[in-house]
Image (cartoon, grey):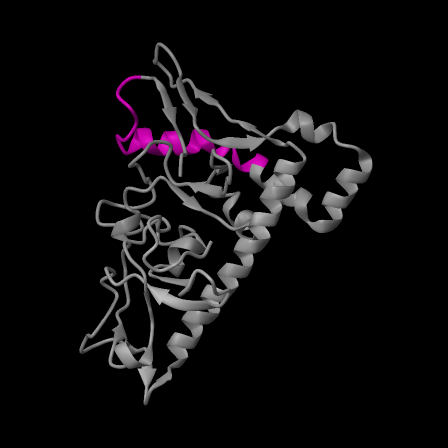
């Protein structure tokens, strides 16, 4: 999940990347944030497998379409809709789980040179939470990283490790041919036809049940099987999410086929 600074395709939410250094940013500080405007209109957020147990009871977990699918937490069923945040990017319910991908922003481990395997702590300079402020927590003290910076680096490293585990999990799903195109039809009371949501992938329950016993045993021992069930159980929350959109007046005006996740 790391990217090179200045790369054409930056990760979701990031507008730019710059390496953090004591020489250039020795007097910079970090301001606490009580909102995430960049998330307010985002309906799908990348997840790591370690988050599946936490997310399964709160949000649907699906997989993106494409050659390299990533797990996604759905915070809305339509592009531009996030039912957990208000227009300013503040949580409507303070107890809402915020995915680690969001909590990591604006920081990221990235390669400074394409020919190097070394990752450096970078940040998005367009973020309003980091800069040469008069107030806030210092990033460096006497040219050395503060505890804050060390904690930021540690979190970024943990996220990178979780990302590698997640990539291995998805690769195993693909190798076993367990991912299929998903479709959910929701029929609201009084509607002439259902709302149909596509544009995501999900585990095929039938193919899963047809796996050999040794394959299932291996998946259970590795911890993969519980993660698959967490994903499958979470899909029942699609209807709860739809209900939240209806209550918030954010459902489509007419039932139609709409892509649910295409990140």
Q: Position of residue 224 (x, y in %)?
A: 67, 46
Camera-nearest residue between 103 and 91: 103
The picture quadrant where one finds residue 31 is bottom left
| Residue at image point 38% right, 32% down | 77
Q: Position of residue 177 (x, y in %)?
A: 64, 31
The picture quadrant where one finds residue 102 is bottom left
Residue sticking out furthest to the left? 134
Q: How many marks are shown on the rendered structure?
A: 0
Would you place residue 140 above or below residue 75 in this image? below
| Residue at image point 52% right, 33% down | 235
Residue sticking out furthest to the front? 115
| Residue at image point 33% right, 64% down | 123
Q: Is residue 162 left or right of residue 28?
A: right
Quarter of the C terminus within the rendering: top left
Looking at the magenta stretch, what is its main secondary structure?
helix
Q: Is residue 197 left or right of residue 141?
A: right
Residue sticking out furthest to the top? 192
Q: Please provide the residue range marked out in magenta.
A: 232-254
Q: Is residue 128 left or right of residue 161?
A: left
Camera-nearest residue between 114 and 128: 114
Camera-nearest residue between 146 and 59: 146
Residue 241 within the segment the image draws in magenta: yes
Q: Is residue 29 left or right of residue 182?
A: left
Residue 66 within the segment the image draws in magenta: no
Residue sticking out furthest to the right? 214
Q: Position of residue 57 (x, y in %)?
A: 51, 43
């Amino acid at each position: 999940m790391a990217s090179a600074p200045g790369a054409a395709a930056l990760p979701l939410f990031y507008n730019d990347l710059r390496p953090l250094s004591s020489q250039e940013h020795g007097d910079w500080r970090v301001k606490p944030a009580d909102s995430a405007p960049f998330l307010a209109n985002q309906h799908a957020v990348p997840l790591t497998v370690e988050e599946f147990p936490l997310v399964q009871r709160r949000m649907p977990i699906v997989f993106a379409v494409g050659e390299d699918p990533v797990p996604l937490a759905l915070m809305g069923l339509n592009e531009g809709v996030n039912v957990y945040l208000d227009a300013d990017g503040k949580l409507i319910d303070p107890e809402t789980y915020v995915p680690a991908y969001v909590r990591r922003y604006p920081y990221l481990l990235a390669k400074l040179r394409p020919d190097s395997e070394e990752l450096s702590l970078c940040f998005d300079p367009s973020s309003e939470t980091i800069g040469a402020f008069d107030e806030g927590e210092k990033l460096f003290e006497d040219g050395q990283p503060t505890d804050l910076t060390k904690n930021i680096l540690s979190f970024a490293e943990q996220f990178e490790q979780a990302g590698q585990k997640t990539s291995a999990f998805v690769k195993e799903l693909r190798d076993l041919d367990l991912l299929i195109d998903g479709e959910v039809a929701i029929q609201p009371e009084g509607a002439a036809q259902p709302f149909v949501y596509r544009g995501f992938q999900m585990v095929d329950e039938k193919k899963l049940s047809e796996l050999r016993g040794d394959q299932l045993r291996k998946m259970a021992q590795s911890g993969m099987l519980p993660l698959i069930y967490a994903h499958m159980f979470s899909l029942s929350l699609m209807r709860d999410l739809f209900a939240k959109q209806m209550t918030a007046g954010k459902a489509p005006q007419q039932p139609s086929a709409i892509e649910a996740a295409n990140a």
